[in-house]
Amino acid sequence: MGGEMAMSLETRLGRSPLLLTRMAAFVAVGIALGLALAAIPNVELVTAVSFMSGFLLGARAGVVTGGLIEALFAGFHPLGSSLGLVLIAQMAGMALAGLLGGVAARVTGPSRRGIRYAASIVLAGAVATIVFDALTNLAFPVMAGFSRSQTLVTLAAGVPFAAIHLFSNLLIFGVIVRPLIPRLERVWLAS
């Protein structure tokens, strides 16, 4: 299965209506799960959905899907929309999660078991989370015109929240994403 499965799925789908339908499904699920956990600070499933879209549909589809999920989720969030550089940073972070999913599908190879597979999934989730937090935590003070010292204070204040985000995504990627990917692959290849 593994990387060959993701590659064959990506090749089979090409630019087909099925690919667009699956991308739209990921967008819808990403937004719905994002809204479902919106009340819990720094615990989210949007990164995981963006990552899985890239893993299952290919890196290019993952980039587009992750960016679109975040554009719609953050751009029209009921608790307040993101604007400007912050929204761009959020979209770039989720596009990266989709890209990392595509890369992880190729790196893990055919096996969906063992330490290599699990470590690749969790490591990719950690990288996506750290980069997302770095981009978004830096975007606000830059957009607001903060001085260097104000920016450093803002970044330092964000560290506890980023730590919660990282820890929760490590759990999500290890406990939910890792076992869910092979199940989705089996279902989708059968269709």
Image (cartoon, rainbow, N blue to C red):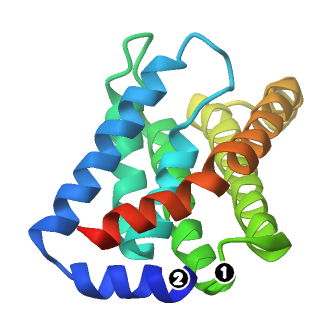
Instruction: Identify the residue shown where x is 78% and y is 45%.
Output: 170
Asked whether residue 89 appears in the rendered view, the answer is: no
User: What type is the residue that disc 1 sits on?
Assistant: Ser
| The one of 155 and 150 positioned closer to us in this rendering | 155
Q: How many numbered circles are shown?
A: 2
User: What residue does disc 1 label?
Assistant: 111
SS assignment at label 1: loop
**1 and 2 marks in contact (CB < 8 Å):** yes
Q: Residue drawn 66% across and 56% down?
A: 178
Picture coordinates of residue 168, whole percent (x, y) = 76, 34
Q: How many angstroms separate mark 1 from mark 2 (CA)?
A: 6 Å
Residue 126, given in percent of the width and then of the height, sits at 77, 53
Q: Residue furthest left?
A: 17
Q: Is residue 62 left or right of residue 113?
A: left
Q: Quadrant of residue 148?
A: top right
Query: In the rendered structure, which disc, 1 or 2, sits on the residue that comes first in sequence?
Result: 2
Q: Which residue is mark 2?
A: 1
